Amino acid sequence: MKLIEILLLSLLFLNSLYAKEPYVDDELMSKITAKYKIFAKKRFYFLQKTLDSVQDASDKEKLEAVNNYFNNVRYVPDIKVYKKSDYWATPWEFLGKDKGDCEDYVISKYFALLYLGVNPKKLFFTYVKSTKFKAAHMVLTYFETPRSEPLVLDNYNLKIFPASKRKDLIPIYNFNGDSLYKAKAKGTGQKIKNQKTHKKWDELKLNMKRKKI
Amino acid sequence: MTLFKQVAIMLSIFLIIILTTVMILNFKSSNEAIQEGLYEDAKNTATSLSLSLGTAGGDISIMSTMINANFDSGNYLQISLVDVDEELLYERKIESKQADVPQWFLDAVKIEAPIASANVSAGWSQVGILNVQSDVAHAYTQLYTILISLLISFGVLIFIGLLILNLLLATILKPLKEVQRQAEAVIRNEFIIQDEIPYTKEFKDVVLGMNNMVSKVKAMFDKGNAELQRQKALEYIDAPTQLKNRKYLIDKLPEFLKIDASSKGGVNMMLALSGMKEANEILGHKQVDDLFRELANIFTTNSAAYPDAIVARLNGTEFAIFAPDCESEDGLTIATKIQDLTLKALTKAGLNTSVTYISIGIYEYNYRETISQLLSFSDNVLTQAKFSKTHIIEVDKSANPPEVMGKDAWKEIINSALNSNSFNFVSWTAVDTKQKQVVHNALSLTLQASDKLYYYGDFMAAANQAGLSNKIYKNIMNMMFTSPDKALKDLTCSLRLSYEYLDAIETYEELSKLFKAQAKKLPLRLIIELPDKFARKNEMELMRYKRLFEQYNIEIGIYEFIGESSNYQYLQDLRPVYIKAESSYFLTQTEQGLSALRLITDSVGITLIASGVMDLKTLEEIQKKDIYTIQGRATEMVDLT
């Protein structure tokens, strides 16, 4: 009987050792709660629940879960939220405020998917033109392989479609900060001071590092 | 090294280090900015070119053309396009062209152009990644230009900085410079009072302290000066007539009765008033004193034609007029006039000139006589005059034997010696009998003729008579500086220059030229002795010589001092290393007079030297007067350490 107890305790201990860190740690959560109040905490709680639910699922299921969760956030232009014409918000700002524009959806979806273990090489920030709204827009694209047709995670059309199904979008430019950084490092063969790949991306990375809320 | 130099060097080094550090940081930051610029350029190209490549729909040939167009039009080291599998699709690359900068700059400065990348897509599909790297050649040229500009700017800055630093330091340390000047003046026994009191407390205290000390020393000198003047008045002046007295005449005679005297002879007139006892009874003492003053005025006025003449009252009724360079005929004329005027004065005073009269004995002396001979012969002549009918007796010749060698023969010998540089130095020591050591070697001259060696005393009188003494001095000064006696190397030597030589118009210029050309090579420490008379009477010339001698580290001594000046300020101005006077002068001085002289000499650091100390008895007497440095035969009797 005692042996079973010891085994169970050991398993519990090992489980706690290998348990995945939460998407938002306790310290940051306290700050978010202090700033954005209890509803924000709830939003992050449910996010964590959503993420935990697809932790071991396929990439497609992860994409669905993440896309659905963040598409519940209200679309509000940056100028109204941040008093700036264009601002790339951190996921904590986005979900904390519970509002944002297209880049903010893309960013939050991107980092949530990274948290879930999706290969960053498969994810691209894609500048597109929305023919429906006749406006510049950004979506997150997922490439199963580098040559496969991407899946489009959009906040206008809440469902995920292959790119060929999105006739309302004209792709302009793909951007993957992570792959650019790696390409650059490979090109010089050495570490570069003040690494930069993309102005907005660099700014976002800095804000992420500082845990800006 | 002066404090100014030390502080200046320290701050200069500090300034240079700071400016150099700023320059290096500036250069580094420029380097980084240029590298940043290279990256930004590359990044902009990568982004814009990747957007253009997106329009090619994945057609490699179109994309290659687009890459070529960009590569050829800009400064790029490489532009490459890799596909999604990281396979190279197309690449343009050049070896970096040589930058137009020196090789050392290329070796010393490393510029790395970062690679900028951008994703290339065609529609929704990924094509690959575009890598762009700028060429560094232009950056090297740019950075080299920046370095040169920086060096010029910082060079100018350092120059201006050091200049300002120097000016600031000079301003801040100006009081210290003044303190230093004052301290140096104290070392030279000069009395400088600093009027400007510095603001800085430390300097202020030092200046006030120095001023106080200098004031005290100056007061000591002034006190000594005043006391010596008072003593001289008591010692050398006959109070009722204000004429010089017998002691003055006796102390002064050595100057004229010497081998190298400037005057070869003259007349010594002895004047005696007879019947003064009766005059006192008739007129009373007060009127007789007035009469004496009137007579003194007659004597002085009538001898005024001879600037070196000494009119002295020897005792109550006897006077002397010692007139160098006065011929006997002129002496007779003067005596006759004096007798005439005196008798008129006596008559005017209501005296009977058959009872009260003046007798004048005129004795023609020459420089070879001793003081006692001169006075004895003069007395004899006066005695004869008293018993003569006219009461004036003139003796034309001194009793001394005539010269052994004729003037022309001497002239020939001296001229020959001048032409063949046959003068040599012989030295006599001046000894500090307390420290028992030689203080300097007094140089004298010998003349080597073809058959005989002549000493200074032998030929100098003849040289004076022949007007050749200045040439001799010029000759020996040249000899001293151009071919100095090797035996004198590293010694301290003194050399006397005569009044006439120093007073000659051309001497100063000649000495200036000689010193300028030769003084640096002089292997000995030289003290030039000036006659006290020259120091007292030629203030302007004296200071000119002082500056000249100082410039070439030649020191000054004074000889033939008898302390007859009315003001001893010249000693303070001249600051000779010593004063030489005959031992007889020191021995006849009163205690007060000598104390006053010592107060002056001690306050300005002058040594008193007694010359002509011939025996141990005189030496002992001189030492009792606290004079320990001597010259003369007695030096041979001192055991030196």
Image: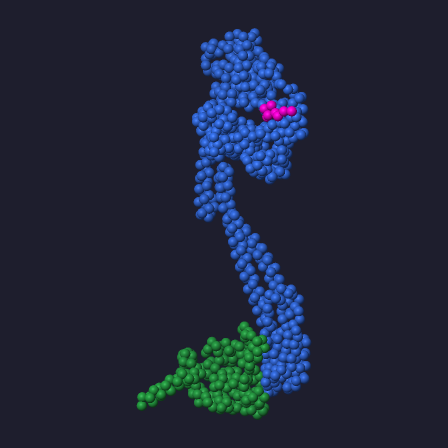
Chain colours: A green, B blue
Q: Nearer the viewer, residue A87 or B11?
A: B11
Q: Nearer the viewer, residue B259 or A187?
A: B259
Looking at the image, the residue that sits furthest to the front is B451
Can you give x and y, in whole percent of width and height, for residue B435 in the image? 46, 33
**Above or below for B135 versus A127:** above
- Magenta segment: B451-458
Residue A76 visible in the current orientation = no
**Above or below for B75 versus B202:** below
**Residue B46 part of the magenta segment:** no
Count of labels in the image = 0
**Residue B452 part of the magenta segment:** yes
Residue B353 visible in the current orientation = yes
Can you give x and y, in whole percent of width and height, for residue B485 in the image? 60, 34
**Above or below for B530 versus B339:** below
Q: Residue at x 46, y 77 (%)?
A: A211
Can you give x and y, in whole percent of width and height, for residue B306 in the image? 59, 21
Q: Residue B71 appears in which quarter of the rendering?
A: bottom right
Q: Residue at x 61, y 17 (%)?
A: B402
